[in-house]
Amino acid sequence: MTDSLESTVTWVDQVHFKASGGTGHEVLMDGPEAAGGQNRGSRPMELILMGLGGCTAYDIVDILTKGRQDLVSMRTELRGARAEDTPQTFTHITIHFVIAGRGIDAAKVQRAINMTAEKYCSASIMLARGGVTIEHSFELVEAAA
């Protein structure tokens, strides 16, 4: 194992938890209202989507900027469909990138998406190997000069 990560999850009350990582940052989690949740934090499965989004967005920005693309902003939108039966794992996730820049090459964006999906984003690769279908799409927005 080349890289090790740490996290501690502490029960606060009811179905409310506080997670802290080895970097010292904290995330609040809460369960659904039907289970006593009070909307005091993200749901754990939302955090998986957020982590996937962060992982793949990092790669896209890194690849495009190293490829000398004039990137101004990027938003990554994720939607996850879950199984109806327990465990309600993700079955299908769509990732849509809204990329703004000046003269961005669509072929370079597609190449970056392929690279993050197939080689770099460990979260994406782990989920796909676990049977989750992941679809990627993007749109380009020309930024003002």
Image: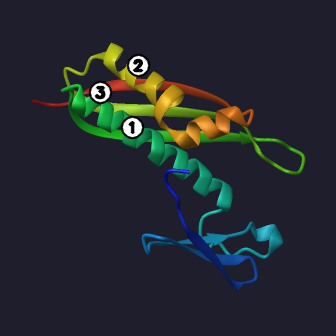
Q: Quadrant of residue 144?
A: top left
Q: Position of residue 115 (x, y in %)?
A: 44, 25
Residue 63 shown left or right of residue 76 in the figure? left
Q: Position of residue 142 (x, y in %)?
A: 23, 25
Q: Position of residue 94 (x, y in %)?
A: 59, 32
Q: Position of residue 107 (x, y in %)?
A: 34, 13
Q: Earlier in the sequence, mark 3 or mark 1?
A: 1
Q: Residue at the front extreme?
A: 1
Write the residue at 53% across / 26% down: 118
| Residue that carries the numbered disc 1 in the rendered image | 59
Residue 2 shown left or right of residue 82 in the figure? left
State if disc 1 and disc 3 touch (CB < 8 Å): no
| Residue that carries the numbered disc 2 in the rendered image | 110
| Residue that carries the numbered disc 3 in the rendered image | 141
Residue 126 shown left or right of residue 105 in the figure? right
Identify residue type, mark 3: Val
Q: Residues within 10 Å of mark 2 (few under 14, many from 20)?
A: some
State if disc 1 and disc 2 touch (CB < 8 Å): no
Q: Residue at the top extreme?
A: 107
Q: Residues within 10 Å of mark 1 (few under 14, many from 20)?
A: some
